Image: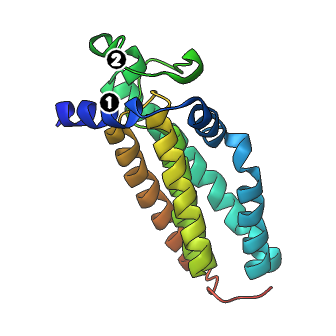
Amino acid sequence: MEELDKTLFLLINSHHSPFFDSVMWVISMKAAWLPLYLLMLYMLVRQYGKRVWIILLFVTLLIVITDQGASLIKDLTRRLRPCNEPSLAGLIHVVRGRCPGIYGFVSGHASNAFGLAAFTSILVRKAWYTWLVFVSAILIAYSRVYLGVHYPGDVLAAGLLGLIAGTGLAYATLKTYQIRRHAHN
């Protein structure tokens, strides 16, 4: 399985260009997604009004779970990032020479993105919105492989972590606080 992950990584990482290096670098920047985060907030406020503070508490908990969960898994598994893997030296393209941290399993970027996508799509319940947030999460995950800092397995496992945490907390939010999906106010 690990060899398949390396092979798939090399296939994705080997297809690069200066243009896409810049595009993927921006996609991987958290600040680049500020308009999407503002849209998430707008959609939640529009749907839940002044009760949005409850949801924002759960969003904070979600980010703690996905981000710190990813860090904990990295520390426990100690799987080197591809950009730190000696057997891949000279074979991979690392954009701007940046290799953040030693370990990469699982991706914090991907777990956060998929967690937010799952959580907010369940609460917002609009098809266009669901497509937008999940396509964004996929782009973020892909960018991490393209940049040479994660294997495909790192982002797939992170996506699963995010989906589980986001879905669980979304339903906990709806159940605990009895917020109806179509509430206005």
Label 2 belongs to which residue? 91
Give the amino acid at mark 1: Leu
Which residue corresponds to the image point at 75% horizontal and 50% vertical from the top-left?
Answer: 34
Report x, y in % for residue 115: 52, 56
Report x, y in % for residue 94: 49, 21
Report x, y in % for residue 87: 26, 13
Label 1 belongs to which residue? 10
Q: Secondary structure at mark 1?
A: helix
Q: Is residue 173 visible to the viewer in this orientation of the structure? A: no
Report x, y in % for residue 137: 53, 54
54 on left or right of 19? right
Which residue corresponds to the image point at 71% horizontal and 67% vertical from the top-left?
Answer: 54
Q: Label 2: few (<14), some or many (≥20) within 10 Å?
A: few
Please state, as top left, top right, bottom left or bottom right, where the C terminus lies in the image: bottom right
Q: Secondary structure at mark 2?
A: loop
Give the amino acid at mark 2: Leu
Q: Is residue 116 visible to the viewer in this orientation of the structure? A: yes
Q: Nearer the viewer, residue 85 or 8?
A: 8
Q: Which numbered marker is on residue 56?
A: none
